[in-house]
Amino acid sequence: MKKLLSLIGAFTLTASATSVLISCSNDKDDDKYGNVFINDDGDFKITTEDLLNWYNETYGRLGKDPQKFLVQFYNIFAVAIYEEASKENNIFQGISSENNSYMNEDGRAFAESLKTQYGKESKASNTIYGRANTEMERARKEYLDNKKQGTKAWVKYLKGQFPWVTGDQTALENAWISNYILTDSTNSAYANLSKALGFGATESTWAKGYSTIEVNRTTISNLLSVFLTQNGNVLINNETLDKTIKEIATTEAQQISIINLVNALGGKNAFKSSNSSNYDETTNTENNGTTFKIEFIENTNDVFLNTLTWRTFLSGISSIFANSPNSINGTISQISSSNNNIFKYSDVETIRLADNNIYKDFYNYNARSSRELNKTQIVSVAPVLNSSKDNQKNNILSNSQKFLVDNYFETKKPVATSEIVLEFSKINSTATPDINKEISPAQFVNNANTQTELINYFEGFYQFYNAYVSSESASSYANAETSTSTGLTDFETFYRGSNKNNLWKLGQNQTDTGIINFLTAKNNEKLLTLDYDTTTGTYSNIAKYSVYDFLSSNPEEDKISTNDKWDADSTNMIGEWASFDQKMTNVSTDATNGKNLLFNLVNDLGRHAETEANSTKEGETAKPYKVLNAEDGIIAFIDSDGLHFMKIDGYSLLNSSNAEKSETSDDKDKQQSIAYDLLSKTNKELIPYLLNPKLSSGTGSDKIDEPTTIEPGINNDIYRQNIIDNMGTEFGNDYSKIINYSITNDYERFLVNNTVAKGFLSTDEDKTNLFYNFDILADAKATTSTTENFGLLSQWLWTYLDEILGTNGDYAELFGKFFEIEGEGIDTKAVYELIRVIEFNQEALSAAPLRSFRNQNDNWNQSVQDNYEKQVKDSKTSTAESFIPKNGLKIKNSSIIQSKHWKTDLSKSKKMKLIYNISDKWFNDEVIINVLNKHEGGVK
């Protein structure tokens, strides 16, 4: 029996909602095939034969408009998914989420969720069918109001649109609804699945997080009330005070009421004292931070309850009791009704942390010292025992969203960058250097400057390079506290973190004569991707290809030339050399070293035609960039605005991807939930520090000449980190491993988690605290467009089903789960050909970024060569010709493909190579015979 679909999205809407026309985009007759898909009662059906006929008549064997075909086919496929999920015995029921890292829930719950969204039976207003029905009613009212006619006219109008429907008004309106579901870009099956499994209308949300409570006066008062209700009969006297909680509070409800209070007031370690037997000063330390650590009780089986006495517990919730425990007697209910009531919020609030040595050096979530805190201010949020798993957390990825982001990450290969530029315009505001004509040291000198100004400039450049760029900081900077413990390299502290716009390593009091006035920091908001269009700004061709060449090789730090003999010909300072050389005579060692460093670096990056003096290995061309710091990922190149020192943000993580597939668990989900909620209530200035992994401080290889000793300024990042190290949370000073823990590629998680930070810091004021400004989730979402322009990764739906159904790249098997492949009346050859078209077009889409990368790279290299030939032709002297840039940078596809930086769980699922075994009878003279339409056509 043929498999039927009750709905198919093989149409485009060619008129407004009040003037509906079904179309298969056939050039000759737009509505010819509507009756193929809508049956006579206004509902939709499709058989494999219908599907094949639609494809052949609409797109033909030559594959006319393949993108549009895929848009329409995937909507058909999305309908098939909804239809299948609505069946009682559907193919999803046997899927286990434990064995599939991209399933949000088990197959039975997945199918039920889709069935509810579809709403074909319920017609609920928030379902696909419900929204379509509402829109039909609106269209009907609008039609009747405009035409000033009755219902008969509306029915007649619908009959004109759907002449093959033989039923009454209900059937005709059903046809309208079916058509709307298929053609409306916001309510199509594909669009709805994109929202359900991918990204919703606004932002990514993880809907399966555990609930927590925000700790404040109201919640603590409520928890005290619940405690009194559950434990009112508990007797408090000298005998019971030294019994444990579980000895007296024997029911689960009693114990939970106590646990929730303990958690809200700082966790189990807040109910210990330096005098108690269960306090160990050496435990729970992390790094050199506080000995106090916030540890929540997660269930009633926690061994802490076996040692927590009523005396210690009551001392932790009441200052009155703590000061005179022997004066309190009676049942808890009696005590709470007396003048000596110890169960009040005000009594908790008067417990000062400064009075207990265990809180020494502790800082809370708002960066406030324990010296000014009370017991109610230790934590901002606390877990709730037995809470439901239905709390939304923005920008925490669900498993199906992770599939989309993994797909984007592997295909586009995004890279975050930032840079410091020694700008031409700041060196000489009146000059207009043209790097198409010349790259020379002369462009980096303003000879109108005085000797003092030149000395300050070259000294400053030398000191900046050695303190911030070089991997080998000279011993003069050894007493400067490195920022690596904060998650930042010293280089980037110039433009992110608490030292922004301050070269703190060069001294506390920088003057206007320093190098800082010649530098511009760029914290790039856009991620660089393989198909990034270099004509749109942010990244030039030289930046793009230098970054990817660096990342696809095994970089070693480049040696900078060491020339110290300069003249007009080696600097292109024709007519100005004598004046400049005189000013630079008898200057400081740092100034001389700075001049030599800058001039050599510029000439090394000049992309000049090779001579004996600058030749590379035989058969190689000098690259247009230099690796200056292989540990921190800093390269240099010269672009139209000056000398760029570009850093690969998060570079240390590119080589540290986990080897194993991600595994989710309830325990990790609980940890992720509490970590997320803790972050949401944390001081905004601290969030970026907490979400970025700490860096190890290494050393470079080549010793450099030491610049003049400089007393560094204050590193404000270290001050922030000291607070973080003493916040005592369960996750220490680094939340980066628990937030979005299911992402196994560390660099991908870095990109996603800094998007999380962006979500927390959304106001204009808060944004100034961000380390990074990119948004990988917005970028990934943009690639799943539902329009006919079709986003790059919109084929995700097909590949996602392939993943969760375990068809392992066998598209024929996947197709066969929803459509008949063989049987009576089935054209098997045509079916396989259609599958081949789907596969071919999907592979073309997947390969598009790399193909774009290659084509743009070829075009740029050609433009560089063309420019060189033109400039040489126009050149007047051999000296001028020697400074014309000649070399581009050719990158092999294989080096990008083989790179392991962008591997995810998708890469770890081995896909079989699809081979179709089709009889030779289907091929004749290398021309595919269209047996459906009985004409020759197609491709070899």
Image: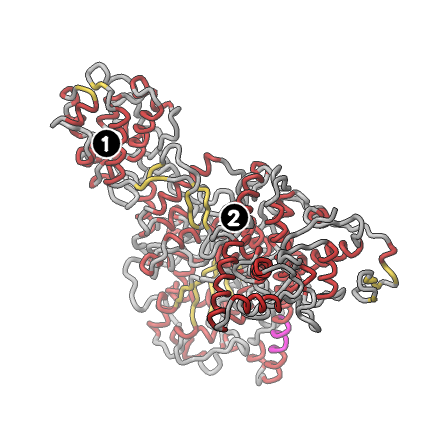
The residue that disc 1 covers is: 357
Whether the magenta-drawn stretch holds residue 866 is answered as yes
Which span is picked out in magenta? 861-868
Can residue 74 be seen in the rendering of this structure? no
In whole angstroms, how far apart are the C-alphas of marks 1 and 2? Answer: 62 Å
* Left or right for 936, reference 601: right
How packed mark 1 is, by other alpha carbons closer than 10 Å (few <14, some 14-19, many 20 or more), is some
Q: Tell me the quarter of the picture where residue 190 sits.
A: bottom right
- Residue 454 horizontal/vertical position (percent): 37, 72
The main secondary structure of the magenta stretch is helix
Give residue 450's position: percent from left, percent from top: 34, 76
Residue 831 part of the magenta segment: no
Q: Which residue is mark 2?
A: 122
User: Where is residue 387 shown, x and y percent of the image?
Assistant: 39, 35
Q: Secondary structure at mark 1?
A: helix
Residue toward you, 456 or 705? 456
**639 or 291: which is nearer to us?**
291
- The reply to whether residue 399 is in sight is yes
Which is more toward the observer, 118 or 688? 118
Q: Residues within 10 Å of mark 2 (few under 14, many from 20)?
A: few
Q: Can you say which quadrant of the picture contains the C terminus?
A: bottom right
Residue 252, x across and y down, in percent: 36, 24
Q: Residue at x 42, y 59 (%)?
A: 773
